């Protein structure tokens, strides 16, 4: 049974994810519909994402979802191109999608202004809709996560992924995704109840960890790795299941832990073979989304469409990460040397 570590702000905020996603569906339509119409009219030949931290992991989800569903190339825009280099760009016909919980970081603001100056349409996916980032955008998409006080972002990340899924659904012709989105709050409620407590003791004294997935799941592999650094003081690295074989795998042997989010789409092909390869070397594998004889099974919820699988899996992880942090004697709400709003230039 999962131990109750419900006294933290991280726990309380992550537990709100289902309700916030339900509320988001009623608040987000104007901006989503506008972007959907623009995608449908082929207004954009390129999408540029711009974000930091957890929001940048949401941008990775956007990349895979937009490219697979809308066929539009997506690239990450480095804020320093604008804030440090002040480099001229040719951005006519591009959508510049800035993702931020606070909407206040100076480098993101500079990047959005830069993008607009050089011809891009600027959309802000932002939790604080009164922020400078929202004020300067052509289109504002409210995350709808509500106040988030814990340094570790949880519900804002989930609301970001859900908003991205809604944007893409508005511009795509995917009946399965359209049918699954209304059921996402219910799926999230079930995901919150998933018991990953068997993975706590194997990681209670760990110092290093790989977190792997692929495709849409890469976003949550990177997000989970960040959260384990922030809240658990655990040196975790997020990798694609393909990329991990190009070098990093060399350090994974006896007792090395691997947390894997098995994709539920085509990128999941061969995932079991990768886990078998890890296991054959004595690696301690923990897998969400696949029940394998050679790995600890972490229960995962069916989201109704493979595009939504990462959203439910990361919520189950957040409850686990909160518990692991407490088990390691840490406070997940107050990681050392970090603060909620990070201002970089």
Image: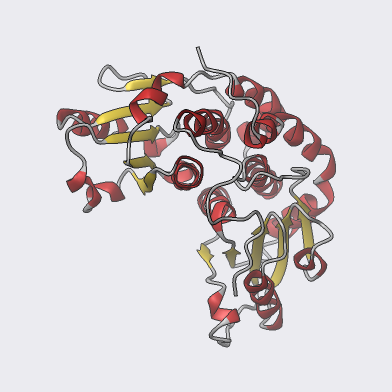
Which residue occupies the extreme front position in the image?
Answer: 329
31 to the left or right of 172: right
Query: What residue appears at the point 82 percent right and 67 percent down from the top-left corner?
Result: 135
Q: Image quadrant of residue 31?
A: bottom right
Residue 209 is situated, as x and y percent measured from the top left of the image, at: 33, 41
Numbered disc total: 0
- Compared to residue 160, the image places residue 129 above or below, namely below
- Compared to residue 276, the image places residue 239 above or below, namely below
297 to the left or right of 344: left
- Compared to residue 5, the image places residue 248 above or below, namely below
Picture quarter with the C terminus: bottom right
* 201 or 78, nearer to the observer: 201
Which residue occupies the extreme top position in the image?
Answer: 1
Residue 112 is situated, as x and y percent measured from the top left of the image, at: 68, 73
Q: Image quadrant of residue 267?
A: top left
- Regarding residue 39, the answer to whether it shows in the image is yes
């Amino acid at each position: 049974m999962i131990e109750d570590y419900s006294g933290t702000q991280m726990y309380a905020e992550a537990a709100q994810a289902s309700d916030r996603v339900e509320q988001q569906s009623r608040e987000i339509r104007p901006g989503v519909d506008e972007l959907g119409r623009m995608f449908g009219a082929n207004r954009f030949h390129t999408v540029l994402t711009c974000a930091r931290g957890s929001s940048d992991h949401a941008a990775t989800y956007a990349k895979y979802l937009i490219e697979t569903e809308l066929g539009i190339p997506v690239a990450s825009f480095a804020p320093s191109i604008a804030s440090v280099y002040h480099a001229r760009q040719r951005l006519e016909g591009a959508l510049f999608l800035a993702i931020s919980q606070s909407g206040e970081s100076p480098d993101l603001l500079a990047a959005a202004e830069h993008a607009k100056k050089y011809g891009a349409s600027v959309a802000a996916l932002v939790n604080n809709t009164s922020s400078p980032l929202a004020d300067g955008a052509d289109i504002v998409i409210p995350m709808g996560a509500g106040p988030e006080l814990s340094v570790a972002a949880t519900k804002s990340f989930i609301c970001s992924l859900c908003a991205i899924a809604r944007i893409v659904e508005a511009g795509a012709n995917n009946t399965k995704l359209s049918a699954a989105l209304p059921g996402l709050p219910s799926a999230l409620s079930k995901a919150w109840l998933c018991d990953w407590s068997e993975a706590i003791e194997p990681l209670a004294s760990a110092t290093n960890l790989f977190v792997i997935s692929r495709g849409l799941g890469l976003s949550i592999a990177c997000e989970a790795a960040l959260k384990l650094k922030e809240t658990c003081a655990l040196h975790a690295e997020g990798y694609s299941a393909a990329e991990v074989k190009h070098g990093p795998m060399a350090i994974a042997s006896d007792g090395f832990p691997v947390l894997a989010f098995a994709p539920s789409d085509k990128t999941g092909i061969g995932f079991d073979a990768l886990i078998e390869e890890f296991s054959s070397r004595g690696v301690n594998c923990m897998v969400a989304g696949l029940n394998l004889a050679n790995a600890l099974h972490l229960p995962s919820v069916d989201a109704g469409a493979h595009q939504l699988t990462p959203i439910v899996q990361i919520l189950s992880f957040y409850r686990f990460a909160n518990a692991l942090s407490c088990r390691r004697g840490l406070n997940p709400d107050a990681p050392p040397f970090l603060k909620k709003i990070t201002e970089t230039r």
